[in-house]
Image (tube, helix red, strand yellow):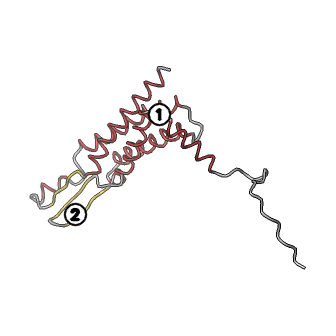
Amino acid sequence: MDEPLPEETHEPDPGLPRPAGSDWAAVRRRVSSLHPPEVLMIVSGALFVIATFLPWYEASVGPLTVSETAWNVGVLGVMAALCGLITTAVASASPLGFGNISTQTAALVGVVLAPATLFFTMLRVLIDPPGAAVTQFTLGLVKVSRGIGLWGALVLAVAMTGGAVRKYRAVALR
């Protein structure tokens, strides 16, 4: 009648791909061997990307408040966000072994794009926010101001640039 099922063996079939656990062990080893400038770039870059989704500008009329993120405040905000995103991706990919990016290439990309991120963020801080003229026309009834996301992004862009410069110096001295 029905044949009994064969007993399962706990040895992996040599023809099947290895489990992903060994890949995670390699990633853990790489993360533990990161140098401080790389950690600074990756952490500040990741937080910068999060800050691009926080309010960069706020407009309020009495109790009603409307806010805009970096992605909605014009070319400078988008350029800052994109430069920060690319810097973070490259800074993360190289030491963690994703992609074929050498350490020298990642350091060069970081030392170019991190200051660009800082530059565009600084311009967004210095240039009057969109709609700032509305405050004058409404005699202060409508207030347009810079939000917490923009201030946080500025601090994080400074940290990311510092990490990029330190990483580039370390790689250039090898």
Q: Which comes before the other along the chain, label 1 or label 2? A: 2
User: What's the mark number on residue 65?
Assistant: 2
Going by the image, does 174 lie left or right of 147? right
In three-dimensional space, the C-alpha distance between marks 1 and 2, rounded to whole angstroms, equals 38 Å
Q: Residue at x 59, y 41 (%)?
A: 99
Q: Position of residue 118 (x, y in %)?
A: 33, 38
Question: Vertically, is 103 above or below 11?
Answer: above
Question: Label 2 is placed on what type of residue?
Answer: Thr
Which amino acid type is marked by label 1?
Answer: Val
Residue pointed to by mark 1: 109
- Judge by depth and name the residue closer to the eye, 146 or 158: 158
Indicate the position of residue 127 as horizontal and vertical percent values: 24, 43
- Where residue 23 sits in the image (x, y, percent)? 61, 46
Give the residue at the far left of this rendering: 139
Give the class, few, some or many, for how many residues have Cα within 10 Å of label 1's Cα (few <14, many ≥20): some
SS at circle 1: helix
Q: Residue at x 21, y 59 (%)?
A: 59
Closer to us: 99 or 15: 15
Question: SS class of the residue under badge 2?
Answer: strand
Q: Position of residue 75 (x, y in %)?
A: 35, 47
The residue shown at (31%, 45%) is 153
- Label 2: few (<14), some (14–19) or many (≥20) C-alpha neighbours in 10 Å: few
